[in-house]
């Protein structure tokens, strides 16, 4: 047996001869039916077993539908040897397939050897496990060995599913040896039959089978109880020693119980030429699949596993869906897959096409595999594939010159740079750069989501002039995320500086405000002078006030007529290389005040010297900022019934004194306070004397007199009235703004010009008392006079003569 095996291996190594003469009378089928034209012939079969080799099980119903998947060799062989996978598979009725090696001799004898599983018997049963199948047909097309049905023998040992089993047809002397041997367990089975003088097995380059349906090649055959159009489990026939150059491939099925035409019989339209050892050629029909290569023949589902990895060029939340179109079991299939890794089972030798589903795109965005709007990639089944998909979004782009700027010269219009997918699909992100010339008319581009967009954002004009945009770089985050139009600004190079008048060093740095790229810009003048690109036609201003280290010191900006009182000063950006200079005047806080605004007014003026000449301004009561070195002239003028008293000054060079007019030079914070006293008029009538006092001042107002005083506002003046004669008594005080008072003493607060009068009246009791005394005296006098007269009369009458 070992010698036989070695001989088979050596024979299998003999390359096929393509110089052999084909069977006489054969003709090219050219894609026609396997059956000869004009008759009801069926393809040849391995018949049902008539003599079960082992224990049988009843199968129901009887198998009559025979499906065959075969390949026909085109060369001639002195021996045939293939290893085949012993796959245990059965249909729902329990019947299994046969895996067969077939050889046709020039004499028309057809030899079959194989291993079968649950092979059906003619009595409707099937043989358990794996059996050794064989059969020989004569040149008349009838079975000659066995004479009825197929032979089914037992192996010398167990055969397990998945074992590799050698099938061989070998010319040995005058016989053909039909051998099967399990390489895994050593189990063998063999039979021999006369070679009928033949020494070669012949192929056919013109037709898959001869007139009886015989051929040299391989076949998987399976009986079913009903019509079957499904696939089979994968079974591989292998011969690594001999490489096929060409072969036919065919699939058929027919009902053995009738003479009706086959359910289907399909072959390759032409001879399959095998280009190289690695190429696999698929063939499928009616649900069945097969493949052939130089060293293998595969029937059934190959389950070529393919891992497809789809990843975005830039990670983002949104993603499209994909469809994979492929062939499985000879049938076209479609599967929806998601980004990431997906596994597809497809027929070997076929291709898989992955498409980006149109539903994943809209008018503003799309997903592609390459820059030519490629939404599909194709690759061989069984080949793991990785592809990057790119998210493109629509952007509408153009430009305009904003504000008051003039148009960009046509010869220097800007250009936009962006990214787009590579021209060929790739496994890693490989974006390529693209450019788009910009005009004032909008154009549409598609750029990569998440990519950067740039622009030659500075276009030079003449000296000190340019057109620029602040959109130097931008990341695309959504459709139409780029501004349209892109704003360009005509700009001038402006030199800015400042000067200090009146000395001192401000503790804070001045700032210059203007506009660049349509937005406010602030420039700190740290080095006193700086240059900046500013928008043509825009305004400008300096910091209005620089505060000093104390609240009463500052530096105030002015530039002549361009200043707003108490606000900023402006200059328009109007030409290239423009120079703008701001002047700051050193100032101190000067407060001109009065003790009472009712008491008088302050008049005068303030003069200062500026780079443009002297400036004179009027001064009135209240605080004001005045330039260092400025001259302050003041005159205090009292109002009616008030009197100017004195100036009270504080600060460097301040005046204090009683002169109503003063001249002061501003060298620091300064206060000048004018004091006015209100008038107090005190009047006494003819019967009253008045004594007054306030503070340390005392005085009197005599009977019938009036006295005018000027006292500090809110002074408390005490008045006391007394009668000028005993016949008078005090009557009342009459004071402006006060109620009538009858007490001799009066306390009067003087906070505005005032007048007060004291009045007296006669004392009645005194006058009456004096009158009564006078009456008594008169009565007494009269009485004495009368008495005296009577006495004189009496003495005159009675006197003696």
Image (cartoon, rainbow, N blue to C red):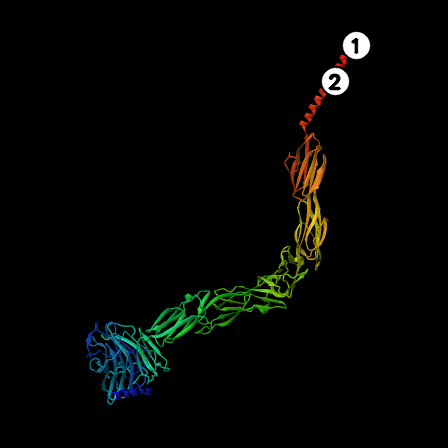
The secondary structure type at the circle numbered 2 is helix
Q: Which residue is mark 2?
A: 785
Residues packed near mark 2 inside 10 Å, few (<14), some (14 to 19) or many (20 plus): few
The quarter of the rendered structure image containing the N terminus is bottom left
Q: Position of residue 59 (x, y in %)?
A: 21, 73
Residues at marks 2 and 1, CA–CA distance in whole angstroms: 25 Å
Q: Secondary structure at mark 1?
A: loop
Residue at (36, 77) in percent of width and height: 349
Residue 168 placed where, x, y %? 27, 84
- Which residue ends up furthest to the right in the rendered image? 801
Q: Earlier in the sequence, mark 2 or mark 1?
A: 2
663 vs 460: above or below:
above
Rendered position, 236 above or below 680: below
At horizontal 37% and vertical 80% (from top left) the residue drawn is 279
- The image quadrant that residue 502 belongs to is bottom right
Mark 2–mark 1 contact, CB under 8 Å? Answer: no
Look at the image and tell me whether residue 140 can be seen.
no
Of residues 356 and 520, which is closer to you in this image?
A: 520
Q: Position of residue 491 (x, y in %)?
A: 60, 65
Q: Residue under label 1, please give it.
A: 800
Tell me if 475 is positioned left or right of 591 in this view: left
């Amino acid at each position: 047996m070992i010698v036989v095996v070695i001989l088979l291996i050596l024979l299998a190594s003999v390359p096929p001869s393509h110089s052999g003469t084909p069977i006489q009378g054969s003709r090219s089928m050219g894609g026609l039916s396997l059956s000869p034209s004009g008759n009801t012939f069926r393809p040849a079969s391995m018949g049902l077993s008539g003599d079960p080799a082992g224990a049988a099980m009843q199968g129901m119903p009887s198998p009559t539908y025979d499906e065959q998947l075969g390949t026909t060799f085109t060369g001639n062989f002195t021996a045939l040897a293939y290893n085949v996978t012993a796959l245990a598979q059965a249909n729902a009725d329990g019947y299994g397939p046969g895996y067969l090696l077939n050889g046709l001799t020039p004499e028309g004898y057809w030899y079959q050897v194989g291993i079968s599983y649950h092979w059906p018997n003619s009595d409707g049963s099937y043989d358990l496990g794996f059996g050794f199948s064989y059969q020989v047909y004569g040149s008349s097309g009838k079975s000659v060995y066995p004479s009825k049905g197929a032979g089914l023998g037992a192996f010398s040992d167990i055969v397990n599913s998945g074992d590799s089993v050698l099938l061989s047809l070998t010319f040995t002397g005058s016989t053909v040896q039909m051998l099967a041997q399990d390489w895994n367990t050593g189990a063998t089975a063999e039979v021999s039959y006369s070679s009928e003088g033949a020494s070669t097995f012949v192929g056919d380059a013109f037709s898959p089978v001869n007139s009886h349906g015989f051929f040299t090649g391989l076949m998987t055959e399976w009986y079913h109880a009903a019509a079957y159009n499904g696939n089979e489990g994968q079974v591989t026939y292998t011969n690594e020693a001999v490489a096929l150059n060409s072969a036919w491939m065919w699939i058929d099925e027919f009902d053995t119980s009738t003479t009706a035409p086959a359910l289907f019989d399909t072959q390759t339209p032409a001879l399959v030429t095998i280009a190289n050892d690695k190429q696999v050629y698929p063939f499928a029909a009616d649900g069945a699949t097969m493949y052939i290569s130089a060293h293998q023949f595969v029937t059934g589902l190959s389950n070529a596993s393919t891992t497809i990895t789809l990843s975005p060029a830039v990670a983002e939340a949104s993603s499209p869906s994909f469809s994979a179109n492929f062939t499985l079991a000879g049938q076209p299939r479609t599967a929806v897959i998601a980004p990431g890794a997906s596994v597809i089972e497809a027929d070997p030798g076929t291709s898989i096409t992955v498409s980006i589903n149109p539903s994943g795109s809209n008018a503003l965005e799309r997903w592609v595999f390459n820059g030519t709007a490629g939404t599909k990639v194709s690759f061989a089944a069984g080949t793991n594939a990785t592809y990057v998909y790119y998210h493109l979004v629509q952007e509408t782009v153009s430009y305009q010159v904003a504000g008051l700027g003039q148009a960009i010269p046509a010869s220097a219009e800007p250009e936009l740079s962006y990214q787009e997918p590579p021209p060929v699909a790739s496994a890693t992100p490989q974006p390529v750069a693209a450019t788009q010339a910009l005009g004032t008319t909008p154009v549409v581009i598609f750029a990569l989501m998440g990519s950067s967009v740039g622009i030659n954002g500075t276009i030079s004009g003449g000296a000190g002039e340019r057109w620029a945009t602040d959109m130097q770089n931008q990341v695309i985050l959504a459709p139409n995320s780029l501004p349209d139009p892109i704003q360009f600004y005509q700009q001038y190079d402006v030199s800015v500086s400042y000067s200090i008048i009146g000395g001192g060093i401000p503790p804070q740095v001045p700032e210059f405000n203007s506009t660049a790229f349509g937005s406010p810009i602030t420039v700190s003048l740290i080095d006193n002078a700086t240059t900046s690109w500013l928008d043509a036609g825009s305004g400008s201003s300096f910091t209005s006030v620089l505060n000093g280290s104390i609240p009463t010191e500052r530096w105030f900006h002015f530039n002549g007529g361009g200043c707003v009182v108490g606000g900023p000063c402006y200059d328009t950006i109007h030409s290239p290389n423009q120079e703008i200079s701001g002047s700051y005047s050193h100032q101190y806080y000067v407060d001109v005040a009065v003790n009472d605004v009712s008491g008088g007014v302050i008049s005068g003026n303030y003069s200062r010297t500026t780079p443009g000449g002297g400036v004179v301004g009027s001064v009135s009561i209240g605080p004001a900022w005045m330039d260092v070195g400025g001259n302050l002239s003041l005159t205090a003028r009292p109002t009616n019934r008030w009197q100017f008293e004195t100036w009270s000054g504080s600060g460097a060079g301040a005046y204090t004194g009683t002169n109503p007019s003063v001249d002061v030079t501003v060298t620091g914070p300064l206060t000048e306070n004018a004091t006015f006293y209100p008038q107090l008029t005190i009047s006494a009538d003819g019967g009253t004397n008045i004594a007054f006092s306030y503070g340390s001042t005392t005085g009197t107002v005599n009977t019938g007199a009036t006295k005018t005083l000027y006292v500090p506002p809110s002074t408390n003046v005490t008045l006391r009235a007394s009668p000028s004669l005993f016949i008078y008594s005090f009557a009342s005080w009459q004071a402006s703004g006060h109620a009538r008072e009858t007490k001799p003493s009066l306390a009067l607060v003087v906070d505005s010009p005032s007048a007060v009068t004291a009045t007296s009246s006669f004392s009645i009791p005194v006058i009456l008392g004096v009158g009564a005394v006078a009456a008594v005296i008169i009565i007494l006098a009269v009485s004495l006079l009368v008495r005296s007269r009577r006495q004189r009369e009496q003495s005159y009458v009675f006197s003696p003569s």
